[in-house]
């Protein structure tokens, strides 16, 4: 899904990846308004661009087609307001689930122990 390679060839018909990217960028102001997200549009565009760039090494056409289908599905679900604001913020802010959780161990303080319950 090398977006750079695809956009450099202007004489070819538009690639599905580019179409999906353009659709998402076009709908961003509407999505930010619907979900009442206080974020500049440019920052949201950068987040979408990061998501696309994270998959730029994918070369298998089957995987690329699947990623495009999932992208269209995610866009539709977002526009239909089937997502919650927190789900959208994870994508826009790059929050990784479970990243803040610390497993109590030898270096854990009392706060860390109560932060996550580990029933061993």
Image (spheres, helix red, strand yellow):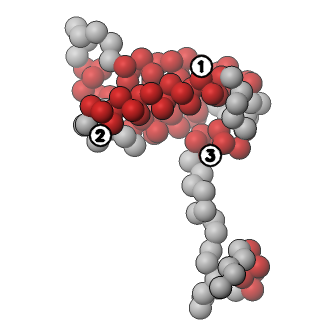
Q: Against 97, is 85 above or below?
A: above
> 29 or 91: nearer the eye?
91
Q: Position of residue 104 (x, y in %)?
A: 64, 83
**Which residue is located at x 63 percent, y 27 percent?**
77
Earlier sequence position, callout 3 versus callout 2: 2
Q: Position of residue 49 (x, y in %)?
A: 46, 33
Label 3 vs label 2, nearer the camera? 2
Residue 27 numbered mark, or none:
1
Earlier sequence position, callout 3 versus callout 1: 1
> 34 or 44: nearer the eye?
34
Whether residue 76 is visible here, answered yes or no, is yes
Residue 58 numbered mark, or none:
2
> 47 or 14: nearer the eye?
14
Q: Position of residue 118 (x, y in %)?
A: 68, 79
Q: Position of residue 61 (x, y in %)?
A: 27, 31
Quadrant where the C terminus sits is bottom right
Q: Secondary structure at mark 2?
A: loop
Label 2 vs label 1, nearer the camera? 2
Earlier sequence position, callout 2 versus callout 1: 1
Residue 90 numbered mark, or none:
3
**What whole-number distance in Å separates the C-alpha atoms at marks 3 and 2?**
23 Å
**Which residue is located at x 60 percent, y 51 percent?**
95
Whether residue 42 is visible here, answered yes or no, is no
Q: Secondary structure at mark 1?
A: helix
Q: Against 83, is 30 above or below?
A: above
Relative horizontal placement of residue 73, taking residue 36 as reference (left or right): left
For the residues bearing labels 2 and 1, Cβ distance under 8 angstroms: no
**What whole-number distance in Å separates the C-alpha atoms at marks 2 and 1?**
25 Å
Number of residues whose C-alpha sits closer than 10 Å to that of mark 1, classed few (under 14), some (14–19) or many (20 or more) = few
Image quadrant where residue 73 sits: top right
């Amino acid at each position: 899904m090398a977006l750079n390679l695809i956009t450099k060839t202007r004489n070819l018909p538009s690639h599905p990846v580019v179409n999906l990217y353009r659709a998402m960028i076009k709908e961003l102001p509407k999505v930010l308004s619907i979900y009442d997200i206080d974020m500049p549009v440019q920052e949201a565009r950068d987040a979408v661009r990061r998501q696309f760039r994270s998959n730029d090494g994918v070369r298998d056409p089957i995987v690329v087609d699947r990623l495009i289908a999932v992208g269209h599905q995610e866009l539709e679900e977002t526009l239909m307001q089937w997502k919650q604001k927190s789900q959208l913020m994870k994508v826009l802010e790059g929050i990784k689930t479970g990243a803040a959780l610390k497993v109590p161990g030898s270096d854990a303080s009392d706060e860390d122990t109560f932060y996550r319950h580990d029933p061993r």
